[in-house]
Image (tube, grey):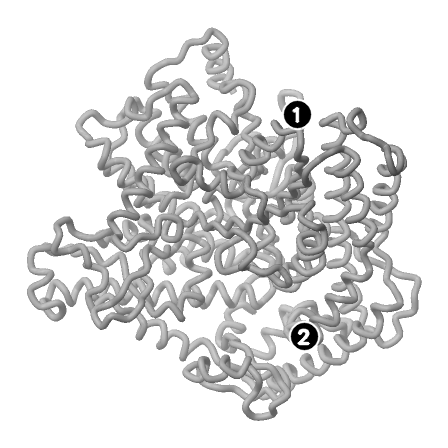
Amino acid sequence: MGSLIQLQQRNSMGKKTKNDPATFNRIAESLRQYRRAELKEFAIELGGSPIDDLYVDPLPSDAVLTTVLSSNTTFLTGRKGTGKSTVFARAQSEIRKRKDLISIYIDVKSLHELADGSQPVTTERTLGDVDPGIFRAHMLRKHFLGEVLRQLLKELNLACESMGIIERFSGRKRGYQELISSLQKIEKSVSSCKLREEELPVLRQITIKARNRSENEKQRTASAKATASGSASALGLSGTASGEVAGSDYSKTLDDRELYEEYSNVVLKSFPFASLIEQVTDLLDESKLLRLVVFFDDFSELEWVSQRLFVDVILSPLNNATNERIKLKVAGYPGRVYYGRIDPGKVDTVCLDFSQLYKSNELQTAEASAIDYTRRLLEKRFSAFGQSISDYFDPSADPAELFRLLFFVSTNSPRLLGYILHYCYLDRVSRGLGITPSSIRLASSKYFSTVVSQYFDRAGRFALEPFEQKLDRHNQQNLLRALLAESIELKKRINRGEVGGTYFDELGHNPPVSHFYIDPKLESVLSSLEFNFLVTKYSDTRDKNGRDVSVYAFLYGLAEAENFAWGYPAGREYRNYFVQRCFDYNRVIHQFLSKTSTIRCNECGSCFSMEDEDKISFYKWKCPNCQSGVCSVVQLSDEFETEVAQLDEALMLEEVELEILAALEESDQWMRAGEISLLVDATYQLVGSRTGKLQQQGLVLKEVVDGHRRSRIRDEAREIYFKKSELDDESST
């Protein structure tokens, strides 16, 4: 706190100190924050509008911002930390300067978290043969959708007040207060979230199908190993103690396309969209406003059924039935965007991941564009704080090489850049030392070991989550190990002269083996690893046989941890280094899939080889045997069920709670809920409630410190969740 006060005092006098470690740390913090990206915390240092002062567009001439500001519906995609919320915040700042537009922002992920954590929904209606678990899952999702609409109307009312709409309201059809009253009635209606008679028939269909699915699963489990069956039962992975249909069975049942269509239509009709759209259109007309722009952030983190319902019940009606008066700006993750009834050909889609944003026939051209963005981002950020990043570079280092390396370690993720600068601050800047290439590589290694690797280690042991999610993480860890083992073995084979002829002769004993290529059809297999930055798609190109291939790269810090060189050699003869035949990893992935996945029918239970995937998908996944069931890829789990059963369920926490503990452990100081929320991608309200829960469990201390309620991790929690164990050692070897 003292250093921050001193920094503020310096700023108030209009002076900036060269090589100021405290300011450097603040810059790093501003880059690695999660929530909403408006950076209000930094208004003291920067003045009025931090987002306007700090924004750097990934493309020249603010091309991304211009696209988002267009009159089209826009989907903005990119992995966590690539700057989607920052673009939205900057776009909304620009819209607020106009008098003919009105905008609102909805954090979909936060609303889903709050709705999901609400009390179980009850009803006075006799459910009859509708399963209680099905009813509960249905009402929770309906409650979430109602919360989205309620928040939309609430934000619209606040925006009208801030813009002084009442003064410009013409009142030709009716008065302003009458219209607002109508909107408030709609808000109350969607908040009540009552079960309608029309919903019962489809809920009965879902109950029947879900029970049949559950029965089939039990029969398959009974014929499996007794240990696997016992472990699944021990963790409650096959239904619930009361005999209700589990939530996972409910979700899988809605994979049936016809049943889902009927279900989503019934849910849609339970909300008064016609009236809502009419009221909003009247508001725009009477206020002489061109359109309402709604920013929906973070919808891809919803589980699949909730995401589909959100698009089909909320987005599609707003987009398709408003005569261009409401325009949507939606942020999501690549490969996890569902368009539903929205025509993808009629919307703008921009991906912030560098391999798509800077796509070029020449890899080096794409890299140059990405490096330029890294340089512009950092130079403007430091300049806004009255600093120059070059002052923190070691005098002996080439600045161009450092910017190039900063791109390599971050792949253009501003949040990842913030982490890298944070570790550079701890290791170099705080000691008055300049940043060198080796310090950046060390920072990338620390980021991997302290942040990214926890995706497998801590979450695998302690995250309270569905079995399928644990299984996916387990399989992804095995896939990563298989890919790494191939790269390590390839390095040995290159050194022994077994591959590549004379091509690798001049590269010494540590040839780069950080990149590999696969068939584009296999990209979905790597999606979870890519989502967590363990691998990153690097480019699209052609192999030596002229076939389209996708080039991927391991996270730089992972390569550092495994002690193999990252990148490709300098020189024109190595411009196509990645497409040497030895970097073809299709075989590795196919071998992995043959051991961990199969194609299974949801009706008759027939299983088919993964080699039949193209053939079955061509017939829209209809089962070749029974002709009535729908096939899907499932992961084989018998061996892992036994492993999961050995975990201590009493120590498990929800993932957000583990992230809160990790933030407290790293800071090792008292923190407010708002400060924690900036680091864990959750609202301060959610953080406040979860730290209260962690306090009751004896894992967190909560006290009033400096006039504010703050939290700090207890030694007991540090011992349980952050002490290095044998499992950590195994996962790092």
Residue 253 badge: 2
Which residue is under mark 1?
708
The percent coordinates of residue 671 (x first, y second) are 58, 31
Q: Position of residue 719 (x, y in %)?
A: 50, 46
Q: Residue 2, position in %: x, y?
A: 50, 17
Q: How crowded is the residue under tag 2: few (<14 C-alpha within 10 Å), some, or many (20+)?
A: many
Q: Which is more foreground, mark 1 or mark 2?
A: 2
Looking at the image, residue 84 lies above or below residue 46: below
Q: Along the line of sight, which residue is nearer the eye, 639 or 251?
A: 251
- Tell me what residue is drawn at x 81 percent, y 44 percent: 279
Q: Residue furthest top?
A: 13
Occupied quadrant, residue 168: top right
Q: Residues within 10 Å of mark 1 (few under 14, many from 20)?
A: few
Task: Out of 275 and 452, give the one closest to the viewer.
Answer: 275
Looking at the figure, which quarter contains the C terminus? Answer: bottom left
Secondary structure at numbered mark 1: strand
Under circle 2, the secondary element is: helix
Q: Amino acid at mark 2?
A: Thr
Work out whether mark 1 precedes mark 2 in sequence or the reverse, and give the earlier one. Answer: 2
Residue 601 point in image, percent of width and height: 58, 84
Q: Is residue 357 above or below residue 464?
A: above
Residue drawn at x 56%, y 49% as measured from the top left: 74
Are the residues tagged 1 and 2 within 8 Å (C-beta)?
A: no
Residue at 55% x, 81% y: name it: 621
Give the quadrant of residue 401: top left
- Describe residue 131's horizontal placement relative to residue 731 as left or right: right
* Amino acid type for the residue under numbered disc 1: His
